[in-house]
Amino acid sequence: LSGRGELVLIGDQQQLPPTIKSFKAEKAGLGASLFERLVAARFPLTMLKVQYRMHPAIAAFPSYAAYDNKLATGIRAEDRPSPDGFPWPTPGIPVAFVGVGTPREELETMVTGGSKANFRESRVVAQIVGELLDNNGFAPEDVAVITPYVGQLRQLETELKRHQVAKSELLLNTVDAFQGKECEVVVISTVRSNFAGRVGFLADHRRLNVAITRARRGLIVVGHEATLLNDRV
């Protein structure tokens, strides 16, 4: 940059950067964006502190985990009523974790292309989606299902078809591809279930942050509790 002009960059270093497809570029340090470099160098930074998307209960954890408790909510809980058709653990708090499998079970499997899938988890997700659609008057596009793995994405497509939910209507995608989007209710299929406690792609806190900040009225995380608890993220 030259001259006396000013440059303003807008972004969020707590979410996913552009995908680097070149190994040489990544090895040369280009995996870090200009925005990330300037933040790390402590250039002046102004944070937009008020969010208007999420129910306050959904926003609470990302505010704590990613934004140093500085993220405020500009809407009331009653503006984002909890969806019917799901047994929320705490009334009025539309955030839930649904455990699949016991600590002694390893449910993930390798599928074609080297990706991961979890067949039992996909069945649980399809059941949850069916109940949400049946009890809320939601259109399929009001419910999003996201997962870190392409292999699970394909398995979810198959399972949702069995529940007569058309892929073309439901918002079904990977976490990375869903960045920048939002939906009334988001169901996250975490996939990983192994004795070693490896969470895979979700070990990147930025990917986790993207996943849990897409929902407006309800967030449901489906996964293997023992595996997920093993990771510091």
Image (cartoon, rainbow, N blue to C red):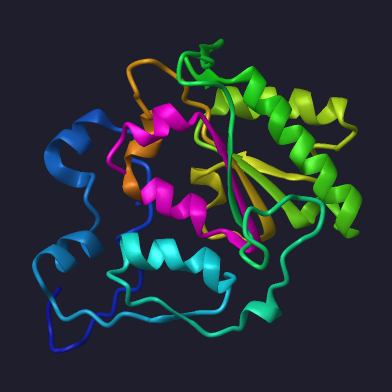
> Residue lying furthest bottom in this view?
4
Q: Is residue 12 visible?
A: no
Residue at the image position 41 percent from the left and 46 percent from the top: 207
Magenta-colored span: 206-233
Displayed quadrant of residue 145: top right
Residue at the image position 60 percent from the left and 25 percent from the top: 152
For the N terminus, the image quarter is bottom left
Residue at the image position 53 percent from the left and 28 percent from the top: 191
Q: Is residue 185 left or right of residue 3?
A: right
> Residue lying furthest front in this view?
90
Q: Eyeballing the image, is 106 above or below 140?
A: above
Q: Eyeballing the image, is 166 above or below 109?
A: below
Q: Eyeballing the image, is 36 above or below 114?
A: below
- Rendering coords of residue 49 (x, y %): 38, 81
- Find out whether residue 217 is within the magenta segment: yes
Residue nearer the viewer, 164 or 217: 217
